[in-house]
Amino acid sequence: ISEGRASPLKGFMRENEYLQSLHFNSLRMGNGTVVNMSLPIVLAIDDETKENIGSSKDVGLVGPDGDLLAILRSIEIYKHNKEERIARTWGTTAPGLPYVEEFITPAGNWLIGGDLEVLKPIKYNDGLDHYRLSPQQLRKEFDRRQADAVFAFQLRNPVHNGHALLMNDTRRRLLEMGYKNPILLLHPLGGFTKADDVPLDVRMEQHSKVLEDGVLDPETTIVAIFPSPMHYAGPTEVQWHAKARINAGANFYIVGRDPAGMGHPTEKRDLYDPDHGKKVLSMAPGLEKLNILPFRVAAYDTVAKKMAFFDPSRSKDFLFISGT
């Protein structure tokens, strides 16, 4: 929040912002403009904390070591209706949703919102902080490289050759459109992921090697961590992924099959229609500034012995792979 990824949000959501996000996937600003805000950005507290706060107008937020990190000002406390939040965000209340089990089910029954004043930069001290570039830092780097187009690629897995094909082909397409220096923002998600996803430190080492080996051009690629938790909320969540990249300076966004999706937690099928993510992005309010680039299906061509775009006329020659 403090670094501007969720701009114009200035703190954890108060109730009116929460309800707009939950029911409309957007916020209406004071001047009448509508901004996309598809995921509630909230802070839960329990009954004891609520009682301790009492009638206070401001509260301090402390880190795991007890350090005062921020002040939440002009606070508002309201009911945390978990079932409604889960149903509206995921479209199901089926058991087994990873983010729900990790963060919502054990959370308190109240939400606290207010304006956030961060007292010092948030550091993870995990050896990866140099990758956690704020939107302002990214925009400065795009300017330094004289980018006339920025295309973002969101991923939560290692880069495979299918990804590389898509990203390199997107740059080719942008050059054909007349852009002189399109820059790739390779923006891996760095918050919570499922236990069976590849850990962040391993992914970042792999991403670094991809650039080192020239699979992606380091002169036209910026690798930065997007420190958001993964909700696995499909078309609802992909709007947040796209909006945050607009705030970081991207004007093109690559989207593929079933973005931010997962398998149904209790049935043998995908939780979301694989095409709905890109369709929703093309219609979502508040994302008009972003050019959506649906990518073609990449698969392993057993004849050419390399990744290539799928040719339905010789479908038997292709093998499909997944980063998951």
Image (cartoon, rainbow, N blue to C red):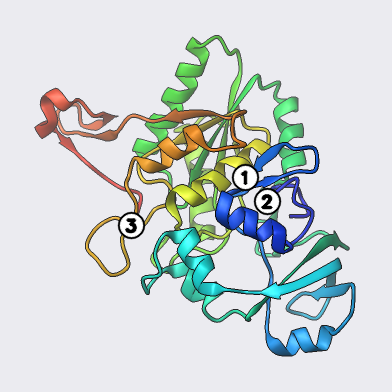
2 or 1: tag closer to the N-terminus = 2
Left or right side of 148 for 262: left
Determine whether the residue tagged by mark 2 lies in a helix, strand or loop: loop
Most foreground residue, 162 or 27 = 27
Left or right side of 95 for 243: right
**Image vertical order of residue 92 relative to residue 173, above or below:** below
Residue placed under numbered mark 1 in the picture: 224
Q: Measured from the top left, where is residue 9 in percent x and y?
A: 75, 51
The amino acid beneath tag 3 is: Leu
Please state, as top left, top right, bottom left or bottom right, where the N terminus lies in the image. bottom right
Residue placed under numbered mark 2 in the picture: 132
Q: Are marks 2 and 1 in contact (CB under 8 Å)?
A: yes
The amino acid beneath tag 1 is: Ala
Left or right side of 145 for 10: right
Write down the quadrant of residue 72 in the picture. Answer: bottom right
Q: Measured from the top left, where is residue 123 in percent x and y?
A: 74, 62
Q: Are marks 1 and 3 in contact (CB under 8 Å)?
A: no
**Residue at left offset 67%, top offset 41%:** 35
Question: Would residue 227 be seen by someone viewing this image from the given angle?
Answer: no
